[in-house]
Image (cartoon, helix red, strand yellow):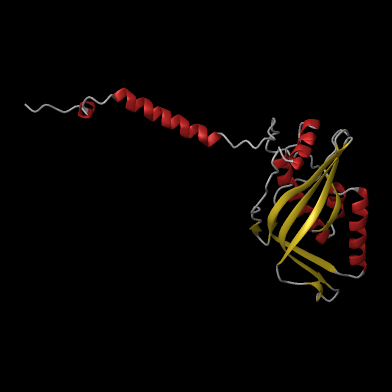
Amino acid sequence: MPVQTNTLQSLGSFPVALVVFAGVAIFLILRLRSVLGKRIGFERQQPPPSAAPGFQGPSFQGPVIEGQAVPMPASRPVPDPHSPLGESLMRIVQRTSDFDPPKFLEQAETAFRTIVTAFANGDRNTLKSLLTPHVYETFEAAITAREAANEKHRTDIKAILSASIEQAELLGDQAAIIVRFISDQVNLTLDASGNPANGTEAVVELTDLWTFERNLKAPGSGWHLAAARNG
């Protein structure tokens, strides 16, 4: 009568328990790698994903342009925390519990998209919530002049290639961070007849340096655009 061969017996003298424990260990390692992230030196307790640290105003969700989602930036580097710039950022981190440099860059990029689009559309309410009073006056005057000339401005942000922190300062309770944005845009001003008056339909790479300021002591104070210039 044939003897049925037990599967475990086919392993011979090889320790079966070792195989089982090794499989469990590999499974646990893969699970840990899936939930653990990389530390960069600025970590502290993070706010919920729905929160937008520092920035106040409209919801900063990525916009959709011409029916297509805007791509993520190719580069959003964070300064080494041990560099002079990183140490300046760390002083801000130590002053306020909701400031996180990587999250700040993410929200600054979204604010950039929102402000550029709002200016093109003449959306004063959105601009007023995101700009300092002085900068808002400048933007509002440009919108008013455009409306008086019966002109319309069109801006399409095709991509943000880079968003990086260039400088950070903390003077008393006032924090200021300069962010360099490199983006591909289409900027075009149309006259009253709908003909191009300024700009081009071609995609142009632009570099902008934006300064965001925040009063760390004022309750509920957020980051506002305090200066903008070409880089």
Residue 52 on image: x %, y %: 74, 40
Please indicate whether residue 103 sits to the left or right of residue 55 in the image. left
Which residue, as the protein is rendered here, is positioned at the far left?
A: 1
Quarter holding the C terminus is bottom right
Residue 6 on image: x %, y %: 20, 27
Please indicate whether residue 48 sits to the left or right of residue 198 in the image. left
Task: Name the residue at 89% across, 57% down.
Answer: 139
Camera-side residue of 189 and 194 = 189
Quarter holding the N terminus is top left
Q: Quadrant of residue 214?
A: top right
Task: Name the residue at 38% across, 30% down.
Answer: 23
Task: Name the residue at 76% across, 72% down.
Answer: 200
- The correct choice, above or below, for 183 with respect to 41 in the image is below
Residue 75 on image: x %, y %: 65, 52
Q: How many marks?
A: 0
Q: Quadrant of residue 15?
A: top left
Camera-side residue of 82 and 134 = 82
Camera-side residue of 56 and 21 = 21
- The correct choice, above or below, for 204 with respect to 33 in the image is below
Residue 92 on image: x %, y %: 80, 36
